Amino acid sequence: MVSLTRIRSLFFRLATLLAVGCAGAAQAQSTNVVEYYVASLDSYFITARAGEIAALDAQPAEFIRTGVTFSAFGASTTGSGVDSICRYYIKLNTPPVSSHFYGVRSTDCAALAASVPSGFTYEGLDFSVYTAINGSCPAAAATPVYRLLRLGDSGRNPNHRYTASSATYNQFISQGWRGEGVAFCVASATTATFKVGTDFATCATKPPVSPTASYRMPSALASSSCGLDSQKTWVRSLADMSYLWATQSPRPDPTTYNTVASYFNDILFKPTDRYSWFDDAASTYDSFSGAPTIRLGYEVGLARMDAGTLVIRRVEPNTPASRAGLNRGTLISAINGQAVGPSLTSAQYSALYPTVSGTITTLTVKLRGASQWTTVALLADLASSGVEITVDNALLLTSSNGKKVGYFAFHGFYSQSSAELVSTLTAMKSAGVQDVVLDLRYNGGGYVAVANELASMLGGDRVRGQVFNKTRFTELQPGTASSELFDVMGVPEASRLHLPRLFVLVTNRSASASELVINSLKPFLDVVLIGSTTYGKPVGSYLHPFTRSGNCGQMYAMIGFEGVNACDSGQYYNGIAPTCFVLDDLSRDLGDVNELMLAGALRYADTGTCASSAAAQDALKKSYVPLDSLEPARRTGAIYNAR
């Protein structure tokens, strides 16, 4: 067995030998060297072998041409200042390594041949090039080709990358690769057109924006000043100071309104603003702060197949709903003895989502897979609900082609989520997952800070030092904006996955902070969406006032900013379309490998294609009607408050 330390020292020793260079004899037959990105290994590979190039080109989902090529000579060519490049394949099981090393035949190849380490296999000569002398190239081959080394730290595959672009060379050094200088010299070269990241084909990353203004909000009213007129005046001042669409906010006569709610609704910029809300301060504060909350532990939607039923889409573990045996796909026909109609009464809605401890809700249900209807009674109290679990069904799966795939369902970006995410992703990294499926199908958002943490753990070194999100604020302060970088160094190293590709399962319930994670990673990772179009909320709020008492007992989430990614891409008000359109499969549990959305991701991981044809997907889209959600409004949000 060869240790990873031994592998690293060999890479260093061979790199030193390669830098020495060597002279040869006579003349040359030209060839072309092509670079590929190997998605499953997150590695780069070069070859000049025609048969190999044809074989790799036949697997474009796994072996992606980067656009990098350079001229060279046939493998056996010799000449003044020319030497052949040999190739070794390195394969180890512990630690897992699958990589290649290229070196100059007369120096490092000769040294390796004298004492071949375990796991090294000689694969012959690949091509010939001019060697550099003290880092300089001869006139006959004036283009330097630089070499970079990524060490096999943190579970990543050791890898060399070659580039003729000094900009690429410096960029990779900034991302943690080790620059090894000029490896050899060629007459001509092309630079990369492909970069790992969905958006890189259409945009270039832009520099961060320095903050130009602070976000302003009015102070909360004193409890003695909570009359109706005072509250309406306060809401108007909130809109004037911090509302994103302040200049387009209607200004109706406040004296004609008998409630704060009706006045708040009528000063919103409709129809664009379908996002702003306010709610009870104490329960909102507890929900976002990781405190125990009163809830029954399910998410419910109207079942379109039958106007007289509801369907449970998700059951949270260790809650009254799970202890009563309710499961995903359970149908509900009556609430507290009152039949479900095309819409719910206020009493039915309150019973579904009680806020008072001791409330008993009686449901008439038919469990998924059952043939009979039955009645269950659920007791709502803090003791039976506890703190909401936001990560569940964390699984290590194996695709049909043997890939290690991590899966987890994530339901809300709250204070308690950080520790859950770190634990889940640390375990996945330790297990050596090659792909991750992030299930955000019912995640309506939460803290921007937690979205940054999740994106930073998934992207790792790929996003270190890069822009996570740029925000612009109220129209009353034109040009005001700020940038936030990925917080890679703020998350544990053991949880950083450095993924080149990410699968995300989405529906129309994937909103706000969920969409922010997707959009922020697109410039740096290949983000593959499986499911249906997301909700469409490229904007967010500050919860104000963020206390349990709020402003006269209410907490407001009035839209205060719009975000774009490092490529200045955003404004997805109509949602983010999926890569593969797949229906939400309520007949199976989340995490079941046969559930349609997860099965679609696993298929794509193996084949690089959607499970159904483009024509079949178009037909599904035309007939698809999403389930109406009956979740409380506050679950949709991108919240910028400090946690």
Image (tube, helix red, strand yellow):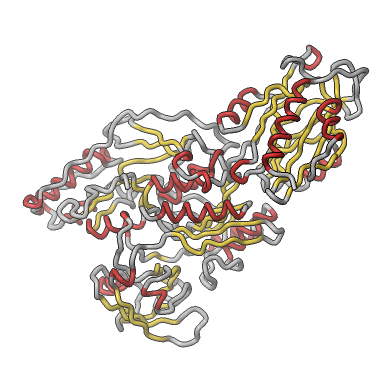
Picture layout, residue 183 above or below residue 322: above
- Residue 370 in the image: state x and y as whole percent: 50, 84
Q: What residue appears at the point 38 percent right and 28 percent down from the top-left corner?
A: 210
* Towards the viewer: 146 or 111: 111
For this orientation, the residue located farthest to the right is 26
Residue 292 appears left or right of 590: left
Residue 61 visible, this orientation: no
- Residue 154 in the image: state x and y as whole percent: 59, 44
Residue 1 visible, this orientation: yes
* Towards the viewer: 245 or 314: 314
Q: Quadrant of residue 79?
A: top right
Picture layout, residue 123 above or below residue 109: below
For this orientation, the residue located farthest to the left is 224
Q: What residue appears at the point 79 percent right and 44 percent down from the top-left corner?
A: 118
State the count of labels: 0
Q: What residue appears at the point 65 percent right and 41 percent down from the top-left corner?
A: 152
Picture layout, residue 533 above or below residue 496: below
Residue 19 appears left or right of 464: right
Residue 620 appears left or right of 627: right
- Residue 421 in the image: state x and y as whole percent: 46, 53
- Residue 599 in the image: state x and y as whole percent: 61, 63
Q: What residue appears at the point 30 percent right and 40 percent down from the top-left corner?
A: 244
